[in-house]
Each structure stands twice: as structure tokens, then as C-alpha cells.
Amino acid sequence: MDNNDSKNFSNAREVLSLAARYAEEYVSDIRDRRVSPSAFDIDQMQFFNSDLARAGEPAEAVVESLHRYGSPATVASTGGRFFGLVVGGATPASMGAAVMNAVWDQVAVLEASAPSAIYLERIAANWILELLTLPMESSVGFTTGSSMANMVCLAAARNTLYQKLNIDLAKSGLAGAPPLRIVVSEQSHVTVHKALSILGFGMDQVIKAPCDEQGRVRADTFPEVDETTIICLQAGNVNSGSFDPFADIILEVKSKGAWVHVDGAFGLWAAASPAKSVLTTGVEQADSWAVDAHKWLNTPYDCGLAICRKPGAVHNVMTTQAPYLQVGSLVPPKDMVPEFSRRARGVEVWAAIQEMGPKGVAAMIDRCCIHAQHLCEGLAEMGYEILNDVVLNQVVATIGTAEDIQEIVRTIQEEGVCWFGTTTWRGKAALRISVSSWVTTDIDIALTLDAICRATEAQMSR
Ligand SMILES: Cc1ncc(COP(=O)(O)O)c(C=O)c1O
């Protein structure tokens, strides 16, 4: 190491101390600040937009400007009153683990390149299967999110069904292969459709199974299936939070040779709560599952999990081989997901579960569901019509006209006390609220209801 190298390393220590100080400042006031950034804060980001030719400055200054101009323009999704999309916060241990993960900078491709990270990922994978009560022999791939987890699982489904028809896709490709039947819930998440499309399935091949008014697939009108059928079910509708009737469908369709995949991006976490696990009854009989850690396990972005009952089905599609790759006795991570080099995102999963334990995870799920119930009751008292059965963490409610809803939500977002968006459910424009953060308290719910009340009264009295 020459003088320059040692100077750079001591500089790294200073920069990390600085970053730690800013990080501490950021988390210290996250619960008291606006949830969405102000127009001024957004405007201040112009600072970053300098000429490329002028880039090149000390690392401390780089980190300082990130904090000065970047931090205020973040959405306070770790603060307890962000209810948009389905966004968890980040638990303290998982944030700390993310910092460690950054300085470790391991490439989670092989055991040889990331021994401790992959060891932790393997423990995390087993814990996930235990928490979600899924078959312990399943493979668990750490993906960017459920979009990619859906794709991994559906790729395994596709190749397995073709294999049964004696078609080796790796050799002959899709061209000339007979079409498979794809049955999705009428309410399948958009990312299921994206995954199917990437995998070469066109909309003409996709049959939509009818749903009831809560968005649950109807078992009594479920389409015909056979051994060439891939079925996609939902654990947790992205609007209503409802669950398909797994026990009424899965064993029946599997007896005909079909493959069942479940998109459980957030809903599958209900299985980790004794109070809520009844919603997932029968889900463990499926062939594959997608679920996110960055949603309801409250790990930092990004982390999804592609889980497959028969590990070989995933490995067959994802395996890469080359003489320079030193593979150990266990299946390496690169053979469970599309990525070769990737971040060891399972480290944060291990940290969150180690921190909360199974009881803590269940308590967090239950707490979010209770908060959703309180929001539902408060909204009903204000005169809102609640459009979903609040079985989980999702609330969909409407009042007045579509314009009233847009205006109410615009006012709330602008005020900055809390944040959520709109949706259309059962033909009506509605508020859509998702409670997914470990940090949300009764006070946050009270403040949110106050904000909704103010905006609603202002709009409805016009
Ligand atoms: C039900 C459902 N499936 C899939 C996804 C996609 O997950 P990700 O954004 O992690 O890729 C989401 C995201 O909100 C979701 O709610």
C-alpha cells in the first residue's frame, strides 16, 4: 500500500463517519417532518444538475450535498405515515445491516466470493420458509422484488411444463413449441402480466378467472385446466388485500398436472401471524411463491424472494457454468436467480428476523392490520363508504364524486402530514391506504384521520 492508498482508506473512514452522522440526523427527525417533500425541497435538487465537466470533488463534499439537497427531497417512507403503494419502513437492525453490507461489498454469486453473506442468506432463506410455513425443501432466491420473483417462478413453471411434453426449451427455444394455457386471476397484479409477457406468453394465451366483489378468484367458475396450464393466484390483492381461496383450488388443479404460482408480495406475510394465517390456508400446496422482504418484513430496498417447491425446477432455468467458477457443494446463489453478480440482500433479511424474532414479526403484521381497522372505522364515521372487507392492511374508501376524491387526496398530499394515493375499485374512485410499516403508531393513525377529516370537510362543504 503506498501513501496514496493509505490516504484514501483514512478518507473512507472520515467519509463513513460523516455519512453515519447524516444518517443519524435523518432518522432522528423522520417522524416529525413532512411525509412528502415540499415544492421548495424538490426545487433544491437542481443543485445536483451541474455540468459533467465540473464533476470531481472530495468525497466529503459529495456526501454532504447528498444530505443537504437529497435528504429533504426524500419521501419519509420510514417515518410511519407513508401509506402509498405497499411500502414497509426499515427496521433498525436491517438499516444497520445495509450499512455493513455496503462496506462489505460482497458479490453474492458464489460462496467463494461472499462466504459470510451467503451463509447468512442461507439461514435467512430457511427462516423465511419457517415463518411463511412453506415447504422446507423449497429453493429461495433473493431478487430485487416480487416482479422479478414472479418472473423466476414462472420461468421455472414454463420450463417444467414443457419438459413434461419432452420439449427442452434450453435446446429448442420457444419457437415451434405448442402454446401453454395460462390462467390468471382477473385481479392478478400488473407485474404478473409483465413477467408472463417477458417469458413469451401473449395476452391471447391468458385466460382470466372471474373474481368476486372482494377481488378473490371464484372457485365455482374456475376455468378448465390440464397438465399444460400455469395458474397464477393472489395472496393479498393490491387494493382490497383479499386472498384467493387456495384450499378450494390448488389441490384440485394440481391433480390435473397444472403448476400453481402464488403472487404474495405482501399478503403472504399473513402466514407469519397466528391471528391472520387463516387467510393463507392451503397456500403451501402451491408450486411456487413470490414475496417481498422490502414490503412487510420492513427491510430496506430492495429484496424479493422467489420460492420454488422443487429447487431443481429453478436451477434448470438459472444455472450457468464456466471453468473459472469455483462452485461449492451447495447450489450457488447465481443458480437461483437471473443475476450473476448481485448485492447480498439476504443479509438484511437475516438482520430483520434476528431482530424481531417470529413473535415480533407476527406482532408487526397484527399491528398494521389493527391500524387499518382503526382507519376504516374513522373513515366510516366521517361518512366514507368502505369498499373492501378490511381483512388485512388495506383500506379502500370513497365519498362524493371522483373529482372530490382527487381533490381530497391532492390536499392531503400537499399538506404533508401523511401520504397515500387513489385507486378505482368496484368502479368507484377511492382513497387507497396500505399500512405496512413497523413504526406506525396509534398517534400516526390519529394524525392521519385528522388530516383526512380536514381535507374531506373542506372539499365536501364547497
Ligand atoms: C401484489 C403485488 N405483486 C407484485 C408486486 C411487485 O413487487 P415489486 O415492486 O417488489 O417488484 C407488488 C408491488 O406492490 C404487489 O403489491
Image (spheres, helix red, strand yellow):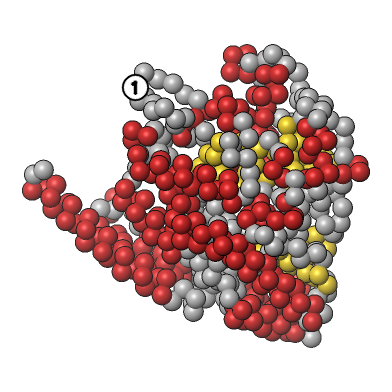
Q: Residue furthest left?
A: 3
Residue at 64 percent across and 81 percent down: it is 446
Residue at 27 percent across and 60 percent down: it is 16
Residue at 84 percent across and 44 percent down: it is 248
Q: Position of residue 436 (x, y in %)?
A: 61, 63
Q: Position of residue 83 (x, y in %)?
A: 62, 67
Q: Which residue is labeled 1 in the image?
A: 324
Q: Amino acid at mark 1?
A: Tyr
Q: Position of residue 117 (x, y in %)?
A: 38, 44
Residue at 50 percent across and 25 percent down: it is 319
The quadrant where residue 28 appears: bottom left
The quadrant where residue 401 appears: bottom right
Q: Looking at the figure, which quarter contains the N terminus?
A: top left
Specify whether residue 106 is in view.
Answer: yes
Side of 413 where 121 appears, left or right: left
Question: From what the image shows, is residue 149 above or below residue 379?
Answer: above
- The local crowd at label 1, few if under 14, some if 14 to 19, many if 20 or more residues have their Cα within 10 Å, is few
- Of residue 64 and residue 205, the one placed in the foreground of this image is 205
Q: Looking at the figure, which quarter contains the C terminus?
A: bottom right
Question: From what the image shows, is residue 379 above or below residue 73?
Answer: below
